[in-house]
Image: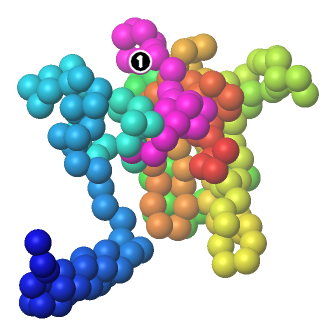
């Protein structure tokens, strides 16, 4: 059957249009169709066994603070231990003793470690003594400078003091006093640093 003279140009135009469309899509990233994935795995839209939302990363852990993969694992060193109810009450009582002292120092703009240590020792606490391998020898109070922080091109240590008080093996009080503010709170111990809150960027 003879081909029409008009059929060839129409076919050529159709091929050219298809080529332009495919070139126009070059470099674009398209998300896979969720229905296509469901069909290939045998699941259906009514399958509710997965708690992940469409498009959610399969690596996010339940309860992850910022949704990052391995968040819980990477921040385990910042997780406070559990306290018994009685020990939590004891820790809160000690926090209530420390708070007015730190507040008074903050109001007087006295937040250097030596001044803070002297004020807290007057409450009857004894400084905690620890061997190089971490064995506790006695005492319950730790007073130290603020943790260094990265600023501009290097680490700087802000003015101020951090404090920690071991009330029981499972109960602590920690706090700080510095120019912007002060804080005191009761909590369980940290796995690596005991009653002192560990710095970020472990």
Q: Position of residue 96 (x, y in %)?
A: 40, 34
Q: Position of residue 113 (x, y in %)?
A: 70, 53
Circle 1: element type:
helix
Whether residue 199 can be seen here:
yes
Residue 81 falls inside the magenta stretch = yes
Q: Position of residue 63 (x, y in %)?
A: 35, 32
**Residue 153 versus residue 159 in the image, above or below:** below
Q: Residue furthest front?
A: 1
Seen at 21% across and 20% down, the residue is 49
Q: Quadrant of the N terminus?
A: bottom left
Seen at 50% across and 27% down, the residue is 80
Q: Position of residue 16 (x, y in %)?
A: 26, 85
Q: Quadrant of the C terminus?
A: top right
Direction from residue 36 to residue 200 in the image, left or right: right
Q: Quadrant of residue 198?
A: top right
Q: Which residue is mark 1?
A: 88
Front in this rendered view, residue 113 or 24: 24
Q: Which residues are magenta?
A: 67-89
Assess disc 1: are there few (<14), some (14-19) or many (≥20) residues with their C-alpha within 10 Å of its C-alpha.
many
Whether residue 97 can be seen here:
no
> What colouring style does the render use?
rainbow
**Residue 10 versus residue 51 in the image, above or below:** below
Q: Quadrant of residue 11?
A: bottom left
Direction from residue 68 to residue 16 in the image, left or right: left
Front in this rendered view, residue 125 or 200: 200
Direction from residue 2 to residue 130 in the image, left or right: right
């Amino acid at each position: 059957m003879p081909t029409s003279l008009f059929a060839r140009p129409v076919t050529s135009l159709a091929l050219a249009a298809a080529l332009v469309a495919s070139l126009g899509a070059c470099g674009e990233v398209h998300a896979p169709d969720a229905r296509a994935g469901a069909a290939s795995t045998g699941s259906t839209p009514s399958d509710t066994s997965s708690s992940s939302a469409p498009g959610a990363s399969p690596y996010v852990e339940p309860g992850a603070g910022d949704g990052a993969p391995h968040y819980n694992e990477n921040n385990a060193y910042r997780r406070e231990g559990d306290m018994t109810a009685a020990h939590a009450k004891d820790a809160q009582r000690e926090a209530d003793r420390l708070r007015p002292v730190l507040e008074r120092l903050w109001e007087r703009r006295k937040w250097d470690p030596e001044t803070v240590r002297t004020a807290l020792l007057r409450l009857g606490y004894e400084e905690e003594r620890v061997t190089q391998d971490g064995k506790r020898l006695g005492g319950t109070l730790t007073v130290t400078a603020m943790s260094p922080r990265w600023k501009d091109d290097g680490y700087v240590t802000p003015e101020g003091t951090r404090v920690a008080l071991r009330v029981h093996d499972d109960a602590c009080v920690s706090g700080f006093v510095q120019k912007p503010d002060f804080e005191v709170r009761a909590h369980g111990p940290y796995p690596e640093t005991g009653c002192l809150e560990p710095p970020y960027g472990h």
